[in-house]
Amino acid sequence: MAYDKFNVLSSTVVPLPTENVDTDQIIPARFLKATEREGFGDNLFRDWRYDSEGQPKKGFVLNDPTYQGKILVAGKNFGSGSSREHAAWAIYDYGFRCVVSSFFADIFKNNALNVGILPVTVSPEFLDEIFEAVEKDPNTNLEVDLKRQTITLLATGKSESFDINPYKKANMQNGFDDIDYLLNLKEEIVDFEKSR
Amino acid sequence: MEKKTLFDKIWDAHVVKSVEKGPDVLFIDKHFIHEVTSPVAFLNLEKRGNSVLFPERTIATPDHNVPTEGQEQTIKDKLSRMQVERLRENCRKYGIELHDLGSEHHGIVHVIGPELGVTQPGMTIVCGDSHTSTHGAFGAIAFGIGTSEVEMVFASQCIMQAKPKKMRITIDGELGEGVTSKDIILYVISKISASGGTGYFLEYAGSAITSLSMEARMTICNMSIEMGARGGLIAPDETTFAYLKGKKYSPSGKAWDDAVAYWKSLKTDEGADFEVEHHFDAADIEPMITYGTNPGMGIKIKENIPTGADLLGSNKKSYQQALDYMGFQAGEPIKGKKVDYVFVGSCTNGRIEDIRAVANFVKGKQKAENITAWIVPGSKEVEKLAHEEGLVDILKAAGFELRQPGCSACLAMNDDKIPAGKYAVSTSNRNFEGRQGPGARTLLASPLTVAAVAITGVITDPRELAVADYAGV
């Protein structure tokens, strides 16, 4: 088992309405020098979160105690850019288990699923609704139900269903990853390689 | 018979198994690794008690964090040194071919793969780096992966991938003078947007593409990811075969003839289906530059910075945030803006053709006083050729600083950082906030444009400087 199982998550949210949040913002390259996977959460959104002296920047959402929770809600095209899995590690390590957006970059989405973060794609209208609801009341909860594939804004009862590949869904529910699957195929793979 | 795209042909030939309602188990021919995205994969591999299944299918080089000065000495930065040493240990332990710092074939992984002939048509190629798409120029399916997937390839030589949709980008016609392949790709991204290719694998076609050299094709495929596409490929042809002939790992003798015969079959069947098709006219492409904080925010150098009304798929707030970061106003001309740094290098434009183009352009001229000019060859081989061809002398005489091979200021993991607030016109691939150093402001452009900017000190259309000969990139 590679990470925590994911079933139903009900949580307040951290809103980040910026579009095209790229992986260099999620974790700048100069923080990729570790040889182990630990402590990346400290540098999540580093240059938006801290000034050059290392002091927290006022006005950035992670420095605002009003907003807390296990769900990050972000503007469209979240996670564009580099393939660094460190971006997903930083988000997970900070404490998020789910990212909601109207559009995700491909590699980030793959990486998120591989480390146990559920990326949930909603319609642009629903995304706006979530941002508005959270702005009105920071204690607004979102409920993400993986089994039913639904995301619900508890304040209004508005709900949308989301897509996830059935294989990836089963992995998330059971905390399995692709390596478990691939290792069971080793003989087939070795035969395939010989035939090439 | 079913009509297939080039992408389908290669993909289908590498599916070990299709998971019901799930992804395909895709066999990987070649795996490139570097010091930054591999250590945790090795660590997890060990934790689970696994080994590298086919070590001869992986090739390694340190490139991302390495210094570009004093590579002969021990790396001063402790964390960088540890990553490079860990790569050496792991390669020794598992029997993986390493092209180490200072060795004959050291360089940026996407530059040395093609130079060595490791990259070949029809292959599946992955690397823990999003610019792996570069290798698509050879008619290979090549894309970037995360560290979990690097571990999968070590353990099983496979990854689990859902087959993406297909998009063809056709560019016909002849490029104008002073217009390069970098301008083609910046133009295409500005039309399709930084996310317009997400979910697709691209094929580039048309006479403006097939007339390009391999180096120029690599520049185009390299930036496929900047549209959100995992990769992009170009059908192999005589240009491809001529490039590969005689390379270290290219087949030879009868094996070469057999390989070429197979490679010739690697093209999209007439009438094969693409979910999306785009057509562009090469005559409409002119020297390009970016003005914002994603590669889709590009314009012709002669144009003004767009006002909110004509922006592409971006909301007003995010657009304004980008302009504020860059210190630009909507509606003003980009031409004539003062620049502080120029950077020539990276897996996008750090090849010998790029260095030739810059050297030819600046020959006999002097860089402007306000400009710091860095030129970083993509590999030891590029560096060697640049010396042999006398390009280094020309560049030094013009005031350029030549550094040793590596990713360098493209992502500023080493000391090659642009200071906060300064403007850099760069041949690299990303203009994200802080990409070239915290607070740095990056404008992406072609090597020719960068050369012109180096001379004038301000944003300049290279066609406006008297140029004896364009290098034809």
Image (cartoon, coloured by chain):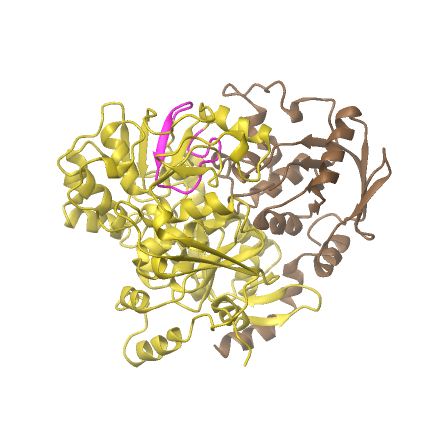
Chain colours: A brown, B yellow
Quadrant in the picture for residue A101: top right
Residue A79's place in the image compared with B252, above or below, is above
Q: Position of residue B307 (x, y in %)?
A: 50, 29
Left or right of A187, for residue B219 = left
Residue B374, visible in the rendered structure: yes
Residue drawn at 72 percent across, 38 percent down: A127
Residue B279's place in the image compared with A20, above or below, is below
Residue drawn at 42 percent across, 23 percent down: B420
Residue drawn at 65 percent across, 68 percent down: A184
Left or right of B233, for residue A115 = right
Q: Quadrant of the N terminus of chain A?
A: bottom right
Q: Nearer the viewer, residue B398 or B70?
A: B398
Magenta span: predominant SS is: loop
* Range shown magenta: B419-437
Whether residue B435 appears in magenta in the rendering, the answer is: yes
Q: Nearer the viewer, residue A30 or B100?
A: A30
Left or right of A67, for residue B50 = left
Q: Position of residue A96 (x, y in %)?
A: 70, 38
Q: Position of residue A90 (x, y in %)?
A: 61, 38
Residue drawn at 69 percent across, 41 percent down: A124
Left or right of B457, for residue A105 = right
Residue B126, visible in the rendered structure: no
Q: Nearer the viewer, residue B368 or B22?
A: B368
Residue B72's place in the image compared with B251, above or below, is above
Q: Position of residue B374 (x, y in %)?
A: 28, 35
Whether residue A85 appears in magenta in the rendering, the answer is: no
